[in-house]
Amino acid sequence: MGAPYVSIRRLVDNSLAAMLAALEVYNKPQMTYRDEVTVMLIVNAWELALKATLRQKNLSIFYRKKRGEKYRSVTLDDALGKVTAHNLWPAPIDGLAVTANVKALAEYRDRAIHLYNAQGLGAVIYPFLQQNVLNYRDFILARFKKDLADSMTWQLLPLGATAPS
């Protein structure tokens, strides 16, 4: 018996949904745990998009199955490595820069999930988040011909009692 069937369309749709959820969460005027939830969703969006890319090229997104165990899909790090190894980054995308940015967010995500991050990292994490959204939009558009911006009805501009850093 082979690996389970995985729909490319569903991976892409769920990836886009995760990214849109991240943007919605981040832009809420009041929410505790905002940075952590946003990072978790953005990293999840990337992982699903990378797996969709691998599936699109008929590459496995599963590790070799061990007897008596369930199939396990590849980790984010392995998906990034496979996309790079198979030259699947679209031409305008700097795969090395995207990989470094996604891995930085994944490290932040891991600390948030398993313990917690230092206080006050919001201003530090914001540039990583913003760049990831732009990189993701370019990647999804080039690879799957879907524009993240088509799912937004207006420009999101942070408004608040103090100006963003």
Image (tube, rainbow, N blue to C red):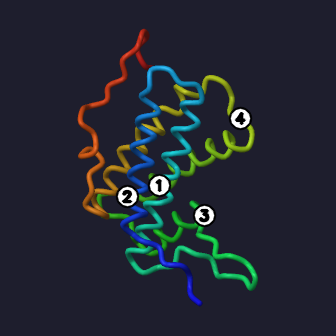
- Residue 80 is left or right of residue 160, and the answer is right
| Amino acid marked by disc 1 | Trp
Say which label, 4 or 2, has the lower sequence index. Answer: 2
Single out the mark in the foreground, 2 or 1. 2
Question: Who comes first in sequence, dot 2 or dot 1?
Answer: 2
Circle 1 packing at 10 Å, graded few (<14), some (14-19), many (20+), is many
Vertical order, 158 against 113 (above or below): above
Using the image, tell me which numbered label, if any, was put on residue 107.
Answer: none
Which residue in the protein does label 1 denote?
A: 46
Residue 112 drawn at (x, y percent)? 67, 39
Task: Give the camera-side residue of 44 and 132.
Answer: 44
Name the residue type under label 2. Answer: Asp
Please, what is the three-letter code of the amino acid marked with disc 3? Thr
Whole-number angstrom distance, CA of label 1 to CA of label 4: 22 Å
Q: Nearer the viewer, mark 4 or mark 2?
A: 2
Q: Residue at left 32%, top 25%?
A: 157
Disc 2, SS: helix
Q: Which residue is mark 4?
A: 116
Q: Residue at x 36, y 17 (%)?
A: 159
The residues bearing labels 3 and 2 have C-alpha atoms spaced at a distance of 19 Å
Q: Are marks 3 and 1 in contact (CB under 8 Å)?
A: no
- Can you identify the residue that label 2 sits on? 13
The secondary element bearing badge 3 is classed as: loop
Residue 75 numbered mark, or none? 3
Q: Position of residue 163 (x, y in %)?
A: 40, 14
